[in-house]
């Protein structure tokens, strides 16, 4: 499939006693291996050292606020902030590339710029900013408005200019539209890196979206276009993942920009954006519906006139 990166996520991948075996096997195939442990009692320095010896390339920890009590309240786990900060230090001490994952909601948006400063102080190589998909426990959190999305994009653009770490935005592909519209210099010099160079986790220079340069396999082996888009398209026990990715009707539809509906379907930026298919599904149960958090009103254009970068 030309896959370059496998991210072993969770839940908590440190519950797997064979995690090191999976990492070593992935490395033997020439893959870049990453993992995202949860802030639990299993997140110890000895386990960090163990996955380092197995060949891990990058480890991410989740920090949503630059302030301890706000983060712990958000995660509903007392001590989670301290545990994550300690883990970040261990990751750096053992020479592993450090990634911080941050979720953007209405509550965390006012702290986004401060958060960007904070992750730089931790010595990260990669900051991944997730825009909330209202599903599971996330449905209890306050969603952004489309105007607040634009405000978040302006903050991220400033941080893109200010810091050297790779900043990747997840589940907000309309950030690319925002930058190309307002900061084309940043888009061309930096953002294609966070969506597509050798520094990035598993991205291509084209827009990555659910089922488009990305797929998710659950711990049960179920195959989804994304962990945020729970549409069952097969299982690795019975289906070849390459065949599912290439040929399943859901995956093929997700890669067909002409299938998109609403304003996404007529937007001149559809080829570099396409909207969050996961968020569209969470709001409408239609994965081809328009992006609910997009502020932009597109011009009506023919498909051949749409932006290609």
Image (cartoon, rainbow, N blue to C red):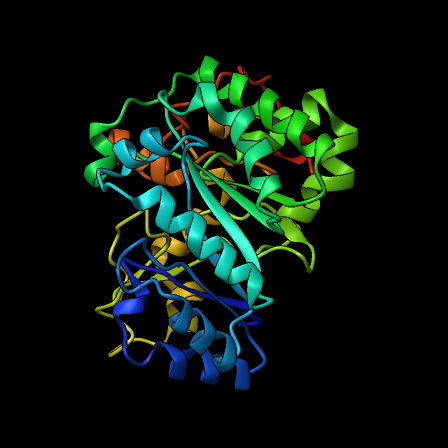
Q: Position of residue 106 (x, y in %)?
A: 36, 20
| Image height of 121 relative to 155, above or below | below
Q: Nearer the viewer, residue 63 or 202?
A: 63
Q: Position of residue 44 (x, y in %)?
A: 36, 65
Whether residue 116 sits left or right of residue 70 in the image: it is: right
- Confirm whether residue 268 shows in the render: no
Whether residue 302 sits left or right of residue 21 in the image: it is: right
Q: Nearer the viewer, residue 108 or 139?
A: 108
Q: How many marks?
A: 0
Q: Position of residue 240 (x, y in %)?
A: 36, 76
Q: Nearer the viewer, residue 139 or 20?
A: 20
Whether residue 175 sits left or right of residue 40 in the image: it is: right
| Image height of 255 relative to 296, above or below | below
Q: Residue at x 30, y 59 (%)?
A: 10
| Image height of 131 relative to 213, above or below | above
Q: Residue at x 43, y 78 (%)?
A: 50
Q: Residue at x 37, y 34 (%)?
A: 68
- Confirm whether residue 179 shows in the render: yes
């Amino acid at each position: 499939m030309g896959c370059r990166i496998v991210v072993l996520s969770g839940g908590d991948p440190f519950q797997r006693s064979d995690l090191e075996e999976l990492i070593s096997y992935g490395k033997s195939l020439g893959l870049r291996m990453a993992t995202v442990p949860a802030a639990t009692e299993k997140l110890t320095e000895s386990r960090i050292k163990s996955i380092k010896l197995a060949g891990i390339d990058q480890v991410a920890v989740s920090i949503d606020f630059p302030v301890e009590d706000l983060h712990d309240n958000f995660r509903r786990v007392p001590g989670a902030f301290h545990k994550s900060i300690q883990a970040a230090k261990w990751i750096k001490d053992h020479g592993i590339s450090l990634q911080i994952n941050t979720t953007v909601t209405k509550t965390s948006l006012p702290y986004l710029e401060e958060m960007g400063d904070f992750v730089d102080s931790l010595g990260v190589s990669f900051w991944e900013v997730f825009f909330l998909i209202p599903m599971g426990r996330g449905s209890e959190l306050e969603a952004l408005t489309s105007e607040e999305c634009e405000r978040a994009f302006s903050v991220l653009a400033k941080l893109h200019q200010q810091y050297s770490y790779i900043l990747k935005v997840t589940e907000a592909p309309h950030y690319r539209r925002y930058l190309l519209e307002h900061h084309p210099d940043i888009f061309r010099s930096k953002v294609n890196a966070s969506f597509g160079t050798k520094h990035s986790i598993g991205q291509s220079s084209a827009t990555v979206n659910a089922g488009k340069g990305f797929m998710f396999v659950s711990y049960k082996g179920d195959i989804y276009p994304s962990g945020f888009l729970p549409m069952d398209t097969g299982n690795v026990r019975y289906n070849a993942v390459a065949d599912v990715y290439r040929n399943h009707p859901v995956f093929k539809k997700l890669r067909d920009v002409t299938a998109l509906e609403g304003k996404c379907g007529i937007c001149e930026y559809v080829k570099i954006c396409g909207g969050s298919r996961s968020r569209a599904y969470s709001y409408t149960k239609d994965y081809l519906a328009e992006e609910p958090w997009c502020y932009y009103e597109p011009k009506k254009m023919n498909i051949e006139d749409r932006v290609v970068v």
